Image (cartoon, rainbow, N blue to C red):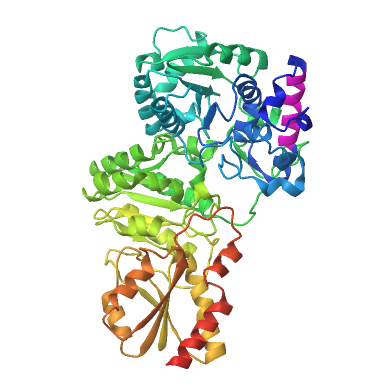
Amino acid sequence: MLEKVNKPSDIKGFSQEELKELAKDMRTALMQKLSKRGGHFGPNFGMVEAIIAMHYVFDSPNDKFVFDVSHQAYCHKMLTGRKEAFLDEEHYYDVSGYTNPAESEHDFFNVGHTSTSVSLASGLAKARDLLQKKENIIAVIGDGSLSGGEALEGLDFAAELQSNLIIIVNDNEMSIAENHGGLYQNLKALRESNGTCSNNLFKAMGLDYIYQECGNDIAAMIETLQKVKDIDHPIVVHIHTKKGKGYKVAEENKEDWHYCAPFDKESGKQFSYNEEEDYEVLTNHYLLNKMKQDPAVVAVVAAVPTNIGFTEEKRKLAGKQFVDVGIAEEHAVAMVSGIAKNGGKPVFATYSSFIQRTYDQISQDLCINQNPATILVNGASVYGMNDVTHLGIFDIPLLSNIPNLVYLAPTSKKEYLSMLDWSIDQSTYPVAIRIPGNGVVDDHRDVDKDYSQLNRYKVEKVGNTIAVLGLGSFYQLAEEVCMMLKECFHIDATLINPRYISGLDTALLDELKANHKLVLTFEDGILDGGFGQKIASYYGMDDMKVQTYGLAKSFVDRYDVSSLLKENGMDLANIKEQIELWLTNN
């Protein structure tokens, strides 16, 4: 049946039995692709019937769907002309894992962050009303995403539209891990009462409401959606689905199967992308030991507990010293500021892509108040997630320019753990630590235990003529450059580990003027507003030449790391060529 579908209207003539066969075909296609390539498993398996019903009832792209996070958009893509990306292995990479307007007229936004669909859909509805058009606007949002502040802001505004806006709340009783927050008590009560309990979050916000218990029943979903099509006011369609439906292993292990690595279909065994030591596990082991020694230590996450290794078992071990605030990074930062103010030792960890949402809280609630909380920034690297909505390469300009924040860039396992230990126990500064993104490096260099004397770079090797500064994950690249300078040009370069992203070691920079003519800086992020430009600016009135290496300010999508580094001049061949040119001219 799936092979017969080239556009959404193709399914409108299908019988109920044919629609059920289509659902089976879609799950088979999902299984084939995800077992070989990995991806968001549970959300997509749980929404097959609902997506079919949506396209059966509504008329996309005239009627407009906005998917929150777009973790459930694979099924939507299958029905909107992109099925080959799920049926033919040669085309698996033709589409992204998220909605993407460049791929199809049926997608309206690049969406990869959570809690945004109601706000985006409200904007579509407002423009429709201004232009006196009539299409349906449908926002799809999962129950986990409701914990995000923007989702509640969107719901709060939606009632004022007084026009068509259909908000499908997909309630599968899960976020990435379990849900956290008081509103989930009300969702539970609504499910148990078949949507009839008097206490109703959505009605309290001024919205109409309808409940459908059988969210995985195509006929029931079609009947429900037909009732709300062309409605003249905002309404919440609350549906109950099963995350991972159709694959027993995923149904029984929802957290592990929210996103999966490639796996064996028969056993359900996932093949790890990386069997080597990783910083998530290292951080978890460190924090659990620290918690045993100090009851003031508390780990805080925002719906991504395994970003620092807190699996369900580890969460139980930590007990009250572990907090998951749900998809609420802004709240997390403000809360850890409060914990630190009252004598606690909080560590908030999330991905670089998500830390972007907390700029105001880091600036206002944490750094103006100068409370000694620790923030761990994970995936802040060209080696991190590479989808355009999940890039982690923008953190250096964002965080390093906030006053009072000490932003550290460890270069090895020992240095990372040493910085983390210092940060938790010190009581003077808000500190952020950029978890290295280039794998766990366990070398023999000595590391400091005290970082309270701020902005003191570490000279790892004394040399002359050229100074090479390798920040964080790019320290090892700087080592390679120094070896190349020695081998190719007989230059014993000075190798420097800056350690502090948020400040300049002006004394050391001044010392370099005596016997150095060129400074090279390497940073694992965008150059504009970043670390290297600060070095270049400091030398602005001097004769010292500065060459900065980093990434161009750009939204790159599903890139190959080696190719991207080469495009940005960070391959040894290009660096050698530039050094040759400089030597020729000097």
Q: Position of residue 231 (x, y in %)?
A: 48, 14
Q: Is residue 24 above or below residue 264?
A: above
Residue 180 in sight from this viewpoint: no
As rendered, which of 403 and 256 lies closer to the eye? 403
Q: Position of residue 280 (x, y in %)?
A: 51, 50
Quadrant containing the C terminus in the rendered view: bottom left
Residue positioned 38% across, 44% down in the render: 357
Quarter of image, res 227: top right
As rendered, which of 498 and 197 lies closer to the eye? 197
Residue 73 in sight from this viewpoint: yes
As rendered, which of 508 and 120 lies closer to the eye? 120
Reply yes or no: does residue 37 show up in magenta: no
Q: Position of residue 493 (x, y in %)?
A: 45, 85
| Magenta part of the chain | 18-31
Q: Is residue 214 above or below residue 305?
A: above
Report how many numbered discs are placed on residues in the image: 0
Reply yes or no: does residue 27 show up in magenta: yes
Quadrant containing the N terminus in the rendered view: top right
Q: Position of residue 361 (x, y in %)?
A: 29, 44
Quarter of image, res 577: bottom right
